[in-house]
Amino acid sequence: MKYLDVFPVPREWLSESDIALSKTIEEWAEKEVISKRLSLREDYDTLLLPAMKTLFSDIGLQKMILSPDDERERMRFPLMAVLACEHTALADTGISAVLSNVLAFQYLALSSQDNGGRIPDEIFKLFEQEKPVICSLVLPYYGRKGQTPGKGIAGLYYQVDVKSVSGGLVVTGTGVRPQVSGSDASLYLVVAADENGDPLIVAVPAQTAGIMLGEPVKTTGLAASRNADVDFNDVEVSEDFIICRGHQAFIQLMNIYQATSAAASMGAVLACYAIHKEWGDTRVIKGKGNIFRENPLVADLMGSIASRIASARFLVYGMGKMLADFLSGEASGTSAFFLVSALVTHVFEIATQCIDNMMEHMASAGYATEWNLERYWRDIKTLESYVLPGTVSNIRAAEHSYGVKTL
Amino acid sequence: MTRIDDFSRPLEYLSPLDKYLGAIVRDWAESYVIPFRRSFDEDWKEHKLIEPAFRRLMGELGFQRILFPEDLGGWGLGHSDYLGTGAFRIFEEIARADSGIAVAFGVVFWPLVMICVEPHVNRRLCEEFAPMFCQTTEPVFSANAMTEPQGGADIENFEVVKGSTIQTTARLEGDEWVINGHKLWPTNSGGVADLFGVICTTNPGSTDPGDFAFIFVPADTPGVTQGPPYQKAGMAADKNGDIWFENVRVPSWYRAHGPGDDLKYFKEVLSFGNMGSVAFVCGVMLNVYEILYDFCSEIYFRGKPLKENDDVAGFLADLASATQVIRFSGYQLARMLDRPDIYGERWSDEIVAKGRAVKYFACDRALELLGKAVKLMGAYGSDRVYDVEKHWRDLKIVQLWMGGKQLCQMEVARWYFDCETL
């Protein structure tokens, strides 16, 4: 995939292990997904699940930092996470979206001061299984008319309640919409309010009694994420499953989730660039002999696409670097939150617009399944809808940059 | 409470039948399409869910007859002063439910425009094909076989390429045309079409407008082969595929008009395509407005309904504003097709360019706003239950078809700026 070098990233930020990881994922992408997708399309059981098993379990991305030897490498985790999600999305944006939830859990466990970066043994064992571990974030979301307005954050409402009982926690919630894979999750990572109204982040294994899955949700894209609304009917878990508490932890969770999701959109747009470039190299326009890319109108838009991709890729790695700096104490969490919120919106806009423009060049072929562009187009639109509902991200950016206080 | 009919249209342009036709199609849409449309994606190949909607609208209600003269069993819209505005109303009502069905329905009339519409009615061909459409309650489809594997939008880009790249040939042998060639992508191909309008050259490589031929070919003519439908990102109701013509023989009088006039009136087909596209956009926007009206009233953000938040309301205003402007401009474009005595012939470069301008503006603006609507709705935006994402996917191909955006830009620039070499 030499085309990745067309849009460089700051190499001095990457270690040898990052480079090795990127090559491993590129090989996985080609062997496990790209070479099979024309025949298997987006089939979950024959293409996407086996590919996730290889990537998550066999290659080991689901336990990337659960047992690291090198503390310095642990601190660099956000950059590795961004790189991993971007490269995974070269093959499939949905797998990358699922991976971003898994990595968000790892990051939270690593950065939590409340539990010392340690994952409870019962949950740790999940990640040791020889099958993909799928974490599913349950974040604050829109409320519904007629429901009692619950506690909220950033204008949104916690989807679940968590109450302390003797020695444990009881989780309740109805019609909860997870970020990914509600149907297939191994572990839900739910955000609720503690007794003071502050965020409380709790791990809930999917096999716990009281969890009921709704009908599968049909979505625009992200076939690797089979989602469903979930009911938590008085689900009891140990207090040990509190992964972390407080606004700072919530900010960190959102930062890594949004940054890796943006990286997934970046991988998608890079994959589309490769398809689009081949189209431009081989098609003719205005009669015989006029290569598509050599037309000034076409080239003008191609150049615009390329410049947007180049800048967005730089921003994605910049987010990873900033979050790594935060872990190592070289940057503040507040500024990181502002920048991630601002940059993620921008990266998604660039990614969706660029793929839109590529599709406009390829016309019907861009829209046909056979050419594979349209799956990325559907996938990143779906991902954007989950990651950036409404104006929330912009308002967060405005809080930091303009001093907005009441929204 | 404000509803879609409150988006204004120039009422003085409308046919006396407008409200009746509109009511019939809306009732059909509510009964036969809207309850089922979110399952259409899985039905892209078989059309088991989609076919009953076509059957009801086209065959049983008889809308497939509208262009043919009354004395041949048609409804006579080809002779009417309300052809454009009448068609616009029907198209927008269908597209409100499903723009894929609207495209498939609209394209039934694309080849027929060549022969059924004043002032260039080909009475003999009308008599030949009217029974196929007017004497049945089964849905009957036609298709314009234009695009070829090597050429992309070259067929529509006649001003530059002048037909020189057309590879499908028509050779006159006695009183028959012998047609050979390979076409891609027409709406209503993929095994659907009963009648093709085939764009051919009578002299390969020629740039002479007289060598451009538009010839009707019934789909059951020996030598015609339709491939299976393509799988696409959306628009399941519109089947597209390959068509091969191998030594296909049709009577010589199946050519629409003859040298020169075939190309001249083919440009009118483009004008109707532009108008229809704007109507499809308009119908989609009206339905998205309806959906968002309910969604933004039911869903809460910051302690109040979404629509009561200023930032959300700003977007909703953009959506309503664009819908209103697109509806106005769409009906104005339709009116221009109704009144060539005022605005110029429908096949003129001016009308084609103005239609392209409105079409690509409407598509671009609508897609931008639909993309934002999906994002505003969050996870529910990409949830097929709400149908907004379906409209977003479907409308993208309205933007891409008929040569795509770049060809629109070139035709607009050529006319408005007198460009000579583009």
Image: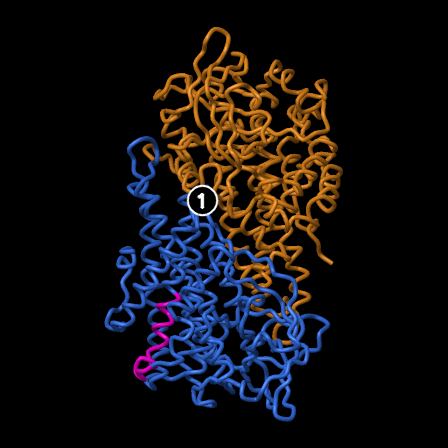
Chain colours: A blue, B orange
The stretch drawn in magenta includes residue A80: yes
The stretch drawn in magenta includes residue A309: no
State the quadrant of the N terminus of chain A: bottom left
Task: Say which residue appears at 23% left-offset and 72% top-offset.
Answer: A12
Task: Say which residue appears at 45% left-offset and 9% top-offset.
Answer: B173
Residue A86 horizontal/vertical position (percent) = 38, 64
Above-or-below relation of B364 to B160: below
Main SS of residues in magenta: helix
Q: Name which residue type carries label 1.
A: Glu
Q: Which residue is mark 1?
A: A370
User: B357 or B389, which lies in front?
Assistant: B389
Task: Say which residue appears at 58% left-offset and 22% top-offset.
Answer: B220
User: A126 or B404, which lies in front?
Assistant: A126
Instruction: Please state the chain letter of the residue tagged with numbered disc 1 in the rendered image.
Output: A
Residue A43 horizontal/vertical position (percent) = 51, 54
Question: Which span of residues is magenta-colored?
Answer: A69-85
View extreme (bottom): residue: A166
The answer to whether A163 appears left or right of A71 in the picture is right
The answer to whether A86 appears left or right of B88 in the picture is left
Residue A139 horizontal/vertical position (percent) = 55, 75
Specify the quadrant of the image occupied by residue B279.
Answer: top right
Above-or-below relation of A226 to B259: below
Looking at the rendered structure, the secondary structure element under dot 1 is helix
Task: Say which residue appears at 65% left-offset and 26% top-offset.
Answer: B67
View extreme (front): residue: A130
The answer to whether A326 appears left or right of B138 in the picture is left
State the quadrant of the C terminus of chain A: bottom right
